[in-house]
Image (tube, rainbow, N blue to C red):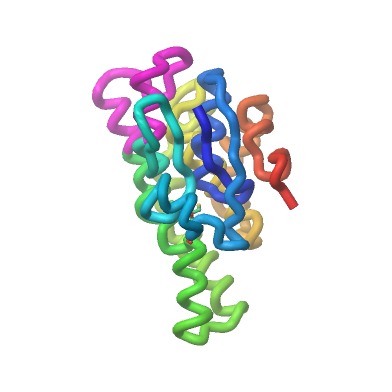
Amino acid sequence: MKLYTYFRSSAAYRVRIALNLKEIDHELVAVNLLKSEQQSAQYLGKNPQGLLPALETDEGVLAQSMAILEYLEETFPQNPLLYGDAWQKAQIRNLCYAIACDIHPVDNLRVLKYLSTELGVDDEAKNAWYRHWIEVGFEKLELLLDSSHEYCVGDKPSLADVCLVPQVFNALRFNVDMTAYPKIAAIYERCNQLDAFINAAPQNQADAT
Ligand SMILES: N[C@@H](CCC(=O)N[C@@H](CS)C(=O)NCC(=O)O)C(=O)O
C-alpha cells in the first residue's frame, strides 16, 4: 500500500501512526502542500478532493483519514485500535470526531489561505484564529478524558490517540499553552514514548524540511 502524505499534514500523520501501530507494510509518497502538489492533475486523479492523505490499496484509492483508519481496522485486525464493546467503540469515535470533525477542519491550510488572501486577515489574527479553535476544542476534550487511563480510553492506544497526537503537535506549533489541558498533555507525552508514534512524527519524515 502507498500512503500519500506530507510531513506536517495532521490527517496524514493519523494514518502514519495507525499503519505503524498495526505494523502494516507500506510506502510513503510525499505530496508537498506548500507547493500545492495536492492540486496537480496527477494527484487529483487519485483524490479528486485534492486533500491529503490518500491510501492506494489493491482495491483502489481511499481518501478521508477516518475512512482510511476504519478500513485498516477492518482489513488488518491485528493490534486493534477500535476495541472494546459497542459503547467503548462509540467513545473512541466520539473523541476522534471531536478532533477530526470539529477542531481540525477550521484550521486547515485552505481555510487559512482564504482568511489571508480573500479576507485580508493578517498573520497575527490568522494565528489567533488557529489557536482559538484548538483551545475551544481542547477545553471540551479535556472534560471527556478520564485520567485513570493511560491513553484516551484505556491502557493501550486507540484511534482516539491516533487523532489526538497530531492535533497536539499542531497546537504546540502554534504556541497553545498545553498546561491548561493536563490530561491531553499527559497522553501526548505517553504516546510519544512509543516507536509507532515517534516514527510517524513530522520531524522524522523523509520529506521534512
Ligand atoms: N477530512 C479530511 C481532511 C483532509 C485535510 O484537510 N488534509 C489537509 C492536510 S491535514 C490538506 O490536504 N490540506 C490541503 C489544502 O487545504 O489545500 C481527512 O480527515 O482526511
Is residue 182 placed above or below 190 in the rendered structure?
below
> What is the count of numbered marks?
0
Relative side of 163 to 13, left or right: left
Residue shown at 38%/23% (left/top)? 73
Relative side of 30 to 142, left or right: right
The percent position of residue 41, horizontal first and vertical second, equals 46, 56
Q: Which residues are magenta?
A: 68-93
The percent position of residue 4, horizontal first and vertical second, equals 53, 41
Residue shown at 61%/78% (left/top)? 123
Is residue 180 placed above or below 154 in the rendered structure?
below
Is residue 37 placed above or below 30 in the rendered structure?
below
Q: Residue furthest left?
A: 86
Q: Main secondary structure of the magenta part?
A: helix
| Quarter holding residue 205 | top right
Q: Residue furthest bottom?
A: 120
Magenta stretch: includes residue 165: no
Asked whether the viewer can see residue 108, the reply is yes
Between 119 and 187, the one lying in front of the other is 119
Is residue 122 placed above or below 27 in the rendered structure?
below
The percent position of residue 85, horizontal first and vertical second, equals 28, 19
Residue shown at 26%/26% (left/top)? 87
